[in-house]
Image (cartoon, rainbow, N blue to C red):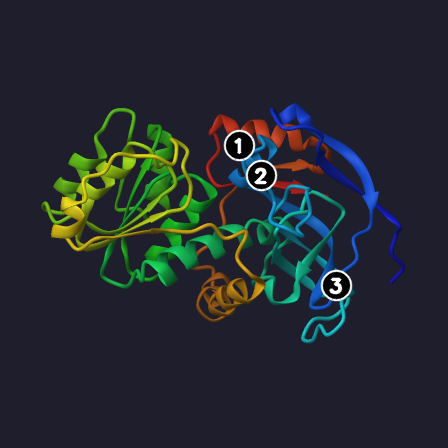
């Protein structure tokens, strides 16, 4: 396969607003040992991309400074020692950065096959969300059948995935969202009750819906003053997982209910973890989640697509929080 010397990409020209995402040309990246080069067909837009653009989420050492944490495309080159993948093979992959480009480098163990019947756009909507949801809910919080879950931000890419994946494993799901239409979308995806946080108190609703017991697990991307309220919502032996802080990382919390209810407060960020740790997640996804995707028992919700050159508009949509599901860039 003949490869170009340069590629089109989207750079963060300076930290700040969406207008600082600028089209650029860069040398083609070269896959190192254990890596592959992917000719990108589609790339997911995620909240961490926005935070990176704002200057608040620097890429880990060695990662591309270009935004973009997930792509789908075909393998264009193999690094030394890569086995089990072939040139021209369609894959979707989790990245540490660099997805907003014609070509991107991915660690070979973090490349997964396209589920049955998937095009590149739907496949690009998978990696960041399914890795995040599976790792935090099922590997860290040990969510299991028969339990209950509260997901904040139910219409985000993470939220729509968490609702469907939890339901596939027979978990009762509650969620919060910011409008009647968004609440309806969450319930259409399988939430037992979606709570409009603008006119309802989710603490009161969860208490009423669970007979005062509370939920077993909470997936929180809001932070701030939600944390003490979340603690009120947790059942005995409940687990609270923080994955983002839209309202800030600090909160004043009484640890008395944490002790009395034997709660677990945990959290994670995926991007800086070593390849080996993320490879373990990928292996579980392939065994546990990919069969569900192949069977159509869950599917990513794609809200909108934009050409790569319109990354600025994609970020403006993300920041407006008017979307339900994923925003995708097409190359």
Residue 284 drawn at (x, y percent): 46, 68
Task: Give the numbered dot on residue 265.
Answer: none
| Among numbered discs 3 and 1, the one appearing first in the sequence | 3
| Among numbered discs 2 and 3, the one appearing first in the sequence | 3
Residue at mark 3 to residue at mark 1: CA–CA distance: 33 Å
**Identity of the residue drawn at 76% across and 67% down:** 79
| Among numbered discs 1 and 2, the one appearing first in the sequence | 2
Mark 1 closeness class: few <14, some 14–19, many ≥20 residues within 10 Å: many
Do the CB atoms of the residues marked 2 and 3 lie less than 8 Å apart?
A: no
In the image: residue 225, left or right of residue 36: left
Residue at mark 1 to residue at mark 2: CA–CA distance: 10 Å
In the image: residue 115, left or right of residue 150: right
Which SS class for mark 1? helix
| Quadrant of the frame with the N terminus | bottom right
Residue 15 drawn at (x, y percent): 63, 28
Q: Nearer the viewer, mark 3 or mark 1?
A: 3
Task: Give the numbered dot on residue 49.
Answer: 2
| Quadrant of the frame with the C terminus | top right
Do the CB atoms of the residues marked 1 and 2 lie less than 8 Å apart?
A: yes
Task: Give the numbered dot on residue 32.
Answer: 3
Work out whether 76 lies above or below 63.
below
Task: Give the numbered dot on residue 318.
Answer: 1
Q: Quadrant of residue 23?
A: top right
Judge whether residue 168 can be spotted in this image: no
Q: Nearer the viewer, residue 133 or 52?
A: 52
């Amino acid at each position: 396969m003949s490869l170009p010397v340069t590629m089109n990409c989207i750079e963060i020209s300076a930290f700040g607003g969406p207008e600082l995402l600028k089209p650029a040309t860069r040398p083609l990246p070269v896959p190192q040992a254990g890596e592959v080069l992917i000719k990108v067909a589609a790339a997911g837009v995620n909240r961490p991309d926005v935070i990176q653009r704002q200057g608040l989420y620097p890429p880990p050492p060695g990662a591309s400074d270009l935004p973009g944490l997930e792509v789908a495309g075909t393998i264009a080159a193999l690094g030394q020692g890569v086995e089990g993948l072939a040139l021209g093979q369609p894959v979707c992959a989790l990245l540490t950065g660099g997805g907003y480009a014609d070509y991107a480098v991915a660690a070979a163990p973090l490349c997964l096959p396209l589920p049955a019947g998937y095009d590149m756009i739907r496949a690009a909507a998978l990696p960041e969300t399914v890795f995040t949801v599976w790792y935090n809910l099922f590997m860290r919080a040990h969510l299991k059948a028969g339990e209950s879950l509260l997901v904040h931000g139910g219409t985000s890419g993470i939220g729509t995935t968490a609702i469907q994946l939890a339901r596939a494993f027979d978990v009762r799901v509650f969620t919060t969202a910011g409008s009647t239409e968004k609440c309806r979308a969450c319930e259409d995806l399988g939430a037992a009750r979606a709570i409009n946080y603008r006119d309802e108190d989710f603490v009161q609703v969860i208490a009423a819906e669970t007979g005062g017991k509370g939920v077993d697990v909470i997936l929180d991307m809001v932070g701030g003053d939600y944390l003490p309220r979340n603690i009120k919502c947790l059942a005995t032996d409940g687990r609270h997982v923080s994955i983002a802080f839209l309202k800030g990382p600090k909160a004043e919390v009484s640890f008395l209910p944490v002790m009395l209810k034997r709660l677990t407060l945990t959290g994670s960020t995926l991007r800086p973890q070593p390849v080996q740790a993320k490879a373990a997640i990928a292996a579980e996804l392939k065994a546990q989640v990919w069969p569900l995707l192949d069977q159509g028992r869950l599917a990513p919700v794609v809200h909108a697509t934009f050409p790569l050159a319109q990354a600025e508009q994609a970020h403006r949509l993300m920041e407006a929080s008017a979307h339900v599901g994923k925003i995708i860039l097409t190359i």
